[in-house]
Amino acid sequence: MAKTKLKHETSVPANETHAPHGTPDYPRIVVPPPGPKGREIVKLDKEHSSTSYIKEYPLAISHGRGAMVEDVDGNRYIDFMAGIAVAATGYAHPVVTKAVQEQAGKFLHICGTDFYFEGMSRLCERLAQLGPGKGKKRVFLTNSGTEAVEGAIKLARSATRRTDLVAFRGAFHGRSYGAMSLGSSKTKQRAHFGPFLPGVHHLPYPDAYRSATGGRPLAEWALGHLDELFKRHVSPDDVAAIFIEPMQGEGGYVIPPVEFLKGLRDICDQNGILLVFDEIQTGVGRTGHMWAADYFGVEPDVLLTAKGLGSGLPIGAIIAKESVMKWESGSHGSTFGGNPLGCAAALATLDLVERELAKNARVMGARMMAGLAKLQAKHQVIGDVRGAGLFIGVEFVKSRATKEPAKTLVHDLVQQAFRKGLLLLPCGESVIRLAPPLVVTEYDVDAGLAILDETLKGLTG
Ligand code: PLP
């Protein structure tokens, strides 16, 4: 079979990210992206890959170091998106790389559903210990976020012998059927794919910037909708679980009031409903704490993680209270879930996050928030800035009075920032999510915000 050979198929160069005089040699645009090699890859991809892929902008990566990404044409970018909040330890972290290389030299697979290996048992132990709250936990390992969500739906139904599920508008839980059924972020993600799981009820998610509460406190207003659901539509005795992102990711980097999550906890306790936190985007140090659950001090019954857990290797987990995870042997499994490379990467990642990166997320997150406050004072189009650690949303509006989403501006901002050497990613209707690798430095934060400032100036005059 003929294979297209790309000219630049070489081994990854171990480029340094600093110039000889010691200052970082990035961002740097040496050819307007995509350059000739990048264009070649884009063309090849467009010819053969699924039309469903998004491809936000034509970045074709060669390699990375820390929070720097270099493309195949030698352009260097500051990464404020971490491959959608995944590259927790940055690119090519030596500790993670070494762990993965060592494991790759031993074995790639044995199937942890059926057999044993130490890395998997250690990761289950580690996550069970790290899970929020004091009680004993058990862990099921998956390949992805959506697989963790699917498993959690099965677990919740089997543990409670109930059918129904509560989820939230703006939620994103993944692309498989159960996860999609819980989702309510963009119609496009559901259009023409139905029917979905029956018995899923969506309620408004409290958004301090946008929810019209009619003067009621935000948490009370949001909990009122759950009350109403139970009064008029579904018996709480039929509800197996409430699935919630403790901070909404895809839906716009929305941070709810803590009273809301505490209220949900109480309602779940009163009605025998499981509280499931989808921490696939918020977990593993991103909020400056291991979990958003720790940030809020609210303990779910089940916590889902993936994304940053393996620093980029596909691995996720369902962490559940022992009283919940009691399903029968053989009732759930996965060929690749808890694969040896993912386990090795996850153990190394958790070491780094515990030792230094959660703290760095707090410190750099505060620096970023302070920088963004200055930008907000300068640029009228920034309607709202909210964040926890390095989970930061910047919402853009046409007018602060009407709060009309500035969708075109966000599109142009993302495209132009890329061409100036800053990688951004939108979410919600008109929000930029700032979710850089947790290894970002002061230099990265300041240089990235300077590009954001300059690009905004260019766009808004
Ligand atoms: N849950 C949340 C909160 C997410 O942000 C995502 C992915 O963006 C998922 C679930 C799905 O994860 P995956 O893409 O690994 O299936």
Image (tube, rainbow, N blue to C red):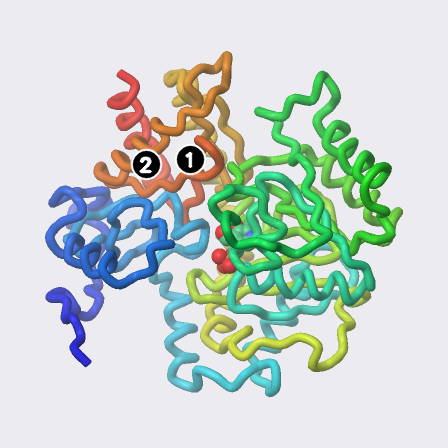
Percent of width and height locating residue 212: 65, 22
Q: Dot 2, how many residues are within 10 Å of its Cα: few (below 14), some (14-19), or many (20+)?
A: many
The relative height of residue 269 versus residue 152 in the rendered view (above or below) is: above
Residue 118, picture quadrant: bottom right
Q: Which mark is residue 432?
A: 1
Q: Which residue is mark 2?
A: 414
Residue 431, picture quadrant: top left
Numbered disc total: 2
Q: Front-most of 216 and 446?
A: 216
The image quadrant where one finds the C terminus is: top left
Q: Residue at x 38, y 72 (%)?
A: 98
Percent of width and height locating residue 373: 45, 23
Does residue 285 appear in the picture of this structure? Answer: no
Q: Front-most of 169 and 443?
A: 169
Disc 1 from disc 2: Cα separation: 8 Å
Amino acid type, mark 1: Ile
Disc 2 C-beta below 8 A from ligand 1: no
Percent of width and height locating residue 56: 33, 45
Amino acid type, mark 2: Val
From the viewer's perspective, tell me whether residue 183 is left or right of residue 45: right
Q: Tags 1 and 2 in contact by the CB under 8 Å rule?
A: yes
Does residue 201 appear in the picture of this structure? Answer: yes
The relative height of residue 217 versus residue 175 in the rendered view (above or below) is: above
Q: Residue at x 38, y 18 (%)?
A: 379
The relative height of residue 108 versus residue 448 in the rendered view (above or below) is: below
Q: Dot 1, how many residues are within 10 Å of its Cα: few (below 14), some (14-19), or many (20+)?
A: many
